[in-house]
Structure formats: C-alpha cells, structure tokens
Image (cartoon, grey):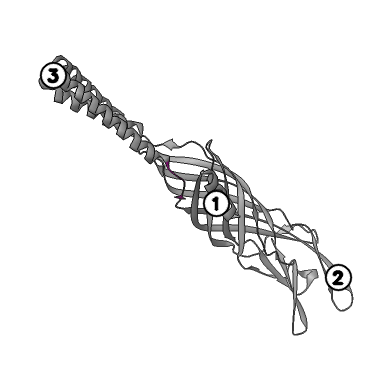
Amino acid sequence: MLLCVACFSIAVQAQFTLVPKIGFEAARTMVNINENGFNHPDVFQLTPQAGIRLDYKFKKGHGVFAGVSTSSTTVEYSFTNPENSINDYLASRAATRVRLEVGYQFNTKPIFFRNNNSGSKSSQKSSRCGSEEKRSEKSSCSSAKSYSRCGSMKQQQAKQKSKPQLMNIRFMPQVGMAYMPGLRNDFAVEQKAGVNNYTYYAGNTGLALITGIGVELGKGKTRLLQANLQYTKGISNMGTALLNSHDGTKSVETAFASRTSSWTFNFGIPLSFAKNPAAKQKRKEKAQQERRSHCEQMKIIYRCRQ
C-alpha cells in the first residue's frame, strides 16, 4: 500500500513527506460476560509505539496519509470456569500487532511567530535609504556610487522581506481507518492436568476508526517536527461470541463480548522528497536582479559622462 502511494506521488510530482515516528499507546479494553455489563480487566496497557507514515499533500492544503505502526489493544482473558469467569480470571496484554493506517488529512495555513522589532528596523533602514536616494539624485556625478549602493541595499531588504525564515505552526485534523491483519480466533482452549484452561481474546478487532489532530512545527518552508494525537476505536469483531463448554454434568453456553479503544501520541521529524521549485525560482530572480542592477549602473555612468 505504501509503495503504491509513493509511486503515485512521484508520477504526478506532488509533495509527499515521510515521517518516522515514535510514541506510546494507552489502550482500554472492556469485557462483557452474559450481558452483565462491561468491566475493565486489571491490566496495564500503556505501551511504546513505533511506526512510519507517508503524507501526500495536494496544492489546496488537503491530503491523504498512509502508515504502518504497532498496536497493543488485545487482552488475553483467561479462566477455567466459564460460569464464574466474571470473577475468577487472569488478564494479560496480548502480543503486539501490526496496524496499517490510511486516511484523509486537512492542513491549515501556517501561523507565523512574527518578531515585532523586525518591522521597525526595516522601516528605519528603508527611510534612511530613501533619503540617501533623494540626495544622490540632487547631487552631481560624484554621488553615482552612493545611488548604486542604496539601490542594491533596497533590493537586498526587499528580498529578505519577501521570503522571511520565520518559525511557524500548522494544525492537521485527520480521519481514517486502521486494519490489523492476523485476526485471532475468539477463544483458545488448553488442557492442563485434566482441567480445561480457556482464553478469550478481548479487543480482537480487525478494523478500527481513527480520528485525531496533528501539529507541525516549521521554519519558513522547512518542516522541523510533527506530532500526532489520535483516538482509535475498534469496529469489527466486537459482537457476541459464544463459548460452549461442559462441566461434567451439563453443557454450558457463555456469551462474551468486548470493546476496545486507545489514545496514541507520537512524534517524528518529517523527511520531504518533493521537488522544490523555490530554489530554481530563487536563482532566476537573483539573475534578473543582477541584470537590472547592472543596467541601472550603466545608465548612471552614461549620464555622468555626458
């Protein structure tokens, strides 16, 4: 899936970003037995998380994302007597699973952290440069060098003002789906010393809904850090599962159900592989400014010689 998205991005020359990420996941899994209400097994489910994510950004700020990460939402709910499993049980966190993510994301415009002092300084420089320019226009040919120097100063100031490298932040609301391959059977039975040991895999979901928001910190057009806060809720295989057992005298049917959700926080450094036309445009503008400055200097020299 990631390979297909990457190939499509290269084909249309759009901007895509690869983000290796680390963080943690806080899962909450509930168990319901014979419709007696959901209870929370006593198991600690704050686990580290690692993954990688590919962001594909369109021109208007919208985009899609795809990624791979780890997830630990399944709980092994073990017992020997199904009829008393609501009170007599052992709960432990199941093995970590792989989670594939895909979804849609909206990127807001960057919010810049401006420096108030920069505006006053630039205005003072421009006013000083303007006064120098007026004096040079009124003076004779001996002030031609001052005129040329003032013009180059104005060009440099305009260039710096047009492309400031300011710190900025943008927000990225997102929604998507997660798929967890390798779905287990709902129950497992193991016999030890003539006694059946049952395990119910609570939170054994294959599909989940993802919602959340991301925050990206940058400087100018350079992306420095990206953080994501996501909420995931299992939506598949959350129905009632029946366990048929025999206590030696009669058959017993026990109904199990579960719910699972988690909060995930992760962060990473974005790695952009998009073609950047800014450098090419920058070189073009620089060449145009140099030619314009050269022409102005030649005109001044020509007037002085006359």
**Which residue lies most toward the right here?**
250
Residue 252, disc? 2
**Residue 135 or residue 101, whichever sits in front:** 135
Which residue carries the number 3 mark? 304
- Whole-percent x and y of residue 27? 61, 58
The quadrant where residue 193 appears: bottom right
Say what secondary structure mark 3 lies in. Answer: helix
12, above or below 144, in the image: below
- Upstream in sequence: badge 3 or badge 2: 2
Distance (Cα) linking label 2 and label 1: 53 Å
- Whole-percent x and y of residue 252? 86, 70
Residue 6, disc? 1
Task: Find the magenta span and give its range.
Answer: 271-276
From the image, state whether disc 3 or disc 1 is nearer to you.
Answer: 3
**Residue 275 or residue 46, whichever sits in front:** 275
In the rendered image, which quarter contains the N terminus? bottom right
Q: Quick check: marks 2 and 1 in contact, CB under 8 Å? A: no
254, above or below 273, in the image: below
Say what secondary structure mark 2 lies in. Answer: strand
Residue under the point 57% across and 48% down: 8
The quadrant where residue 70 appears: bottom right
- Whole-percent x and y of residue 234? 68, 54
> How many numbered marks appear?
3
- Whole-percent x and y of residue 101? 61, 53
Type of amino acid under label 1: Ala
- Upstream in sequence: badge 2 or badge 1: 1
Residue under the point 61% across and 59% down: 99
The quadrant where residue 220 appears: top left
Distance (Cα) linking label 3 and label 2: 109 Å
- Upstream in sequence: badge 3 or badge 1: 1
